[in-house]
Image (spheres, rainbow, N blue to C red):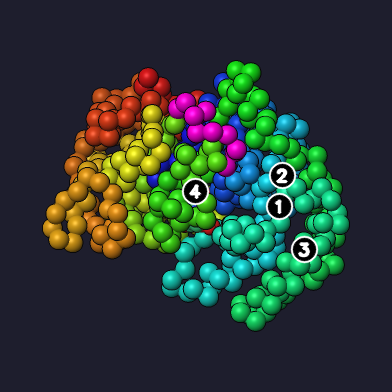
Amino acid sequence: MIVGAQWGDEGKGKIVDLLAQESDVVCRYQGGPNAGHTIIAGGETFKIRQVPSGVISGKTSMIGAGCVVDPEVLLAELDELGSRGIDTSSVVVSGNAHLIMPWHVAIDQASERRLGKLKIGTTRRGIGPAYADKASRIGIRVQDVLDPKILRQKIEVALAEKNIWLERVYEVAPFELEEIAARYESYAQRLRAYVGDTSLLVDRALRTGKEVLFEGAQATLLDLDHGTYPFVTSSSTVAANAATGMGIGPTRIDRVIGVAKAYVTRVGEGPFPTEIQGPDQERVREVGGEFGTVTGRERRCGWLDLVALRYAVRLNGLTSLALTKLDVLSAFPELPVCVRYRLRDGTETEDFPAHQSDFHTAKPVYETLAGWREPLDGELPAAARAYADFVERTLDVEVSLVGTGAERERVVALR
Ligand code: IMP
């Protein structure tokens, strides 16, 4: 199981892609097209949002019940991958996953506009509104595409209510029933071939000794329950939810690899104690290419935060860490690493504050490590190795992989 250990964009796609080489099945269990995965393999760059990254390596790729699926995005992605010679016939989508409908996207956008300065900074892909409808038990599920009559009826019922919200509350244009019904019936015809019982398929794969890889989307600090609420996504992103989201028991997960950048980035609003003040922030962004895969937005950049990472170790039960983009830090002579937070009352803590006001006002306490000022190609220079060792010692979790560049090959296995 692979999980993002920070605020997302840690380079999970690359690690998944690497480990997918030795897996038989790759599964996504939560989130939707808010995830943006960039994979560089064989000199080609793939940017995918909805399909599990394993598809690039030709693995059985499953989208579990805990996901939300935008059929327009999914089908466009399947077409694009197909046109680039990638076989997508082994993609399976759970019938229990929920569909993102056009009104979810419209409400996400309108609600962010309405919140103004208080906005969450969502990806505006309809994720929150789709999960909200799921929890309210008025969602439309992937399996509803199997029956044109049911699909149309559900669209009709939902739209009658959503249009009132769109027009009267958000003051935006309503949707036209016939247009939506026809468009979704045409998506449905194509989607049917991909619908399957992903819980059963994963169970069978595990029973027959296959290797199954779970690919987390978004990341720990964006978890709906344990993240920096309300600046979070609308699903549970932590490792335990891989079991719930796919429909297997928690005892089936053997290992949990957390993926963390050697620094930190955050997209969207919300507190961020180690956000860099001054020109170094810009420098990290430029060198690291820190612009959103999905939205193109500038990512906020900060120094490595071991308080937050310790929290991720706890929440996910991490058995090891992959530290990505270490090469970006080659640009700096000295590297501050946050080892504690100083709280409002002057006390210092190594543990992530349980209350939001403590977190919002927490100030980072840094230890400064030596930089290496040389490109990372081949064996790690001593200072880079010391940086990884410092993380390992402080968190008491082994750093098993270090990423030193964008391509699949640019990974150093420390273990
Ligand atoms: P939503 O998931 O679109 O509702 O956005 C909620 C929050 O999660 C915002 O702060 C987004 O920037 C963040 N977010 C969602 N998906 C990702 C991702 O894949 N990488 C980084 N941040 C994300």
Q: Quadrant of residue 137?
A: bottom right
Question: Are dots 1 and 4 in contact, CB under 8 Å?
Answer: no
Cβ atoms under marks 3 and 1 closer than 8 Å: no
**Among all residues in the image, which is located at the extreme top?**
209
SS category of the residue bearing label 1 = loop
Q: Is 354 in the magenta?
A: no
Mark identifier at residue 236: 4
The amino acid beneath tag 3 is: Ile
Asked whether, in this view, residue 63 is left or right of residue 191, the answer is left
Residue picked out by circle 1: 141
Measuring from the top left, give residue 287's x and y in whole percent.
41, 44
Q: CA distance from mark 1 to mark 2?
A: 7 Å
| Residue 246 image position (x, y, % from top left) | 59, 38
Mark 4 surroundings: few (<14), some (14-19) or many (≥20) residues within 10 A: many
Residue at the location (69% across, 71% down)?
162
Q: Does the magenta portion include 254?
A: yes
Disc on the earlier residue, 3 or 1: 1
For disc 2, the marked residue is 95
Q: Tell me the element at label 2.
A: loop
Contact flag, marks 2 and 4 (Cβ < 8 Å): no
The magenta region covers 245-255
- Given contact means CB atoms under 8 Å apart, are the residues at marks 1 and 2 in contact? yes
Residue 211 lies left or right of residue 121; in this view the side is: right
Cβ of mark 4 under 8 Å from ligand 1: the answer is: no
Q: Quadrant of the C terminus?
A: top left
Disc sitting over residue 155 in the figure? 3
* Three-letter amino acid code at the position of disc 4: Ser
Amino acid carrying label 1: it is Arg
Q: Is residue 103 visible?
A: yes
Sequence-earlier tag: 1 or 4: 1
Label 3: few (<14), some (14–19) or many (≥20) C-alpha neighbours in 10 Å: some
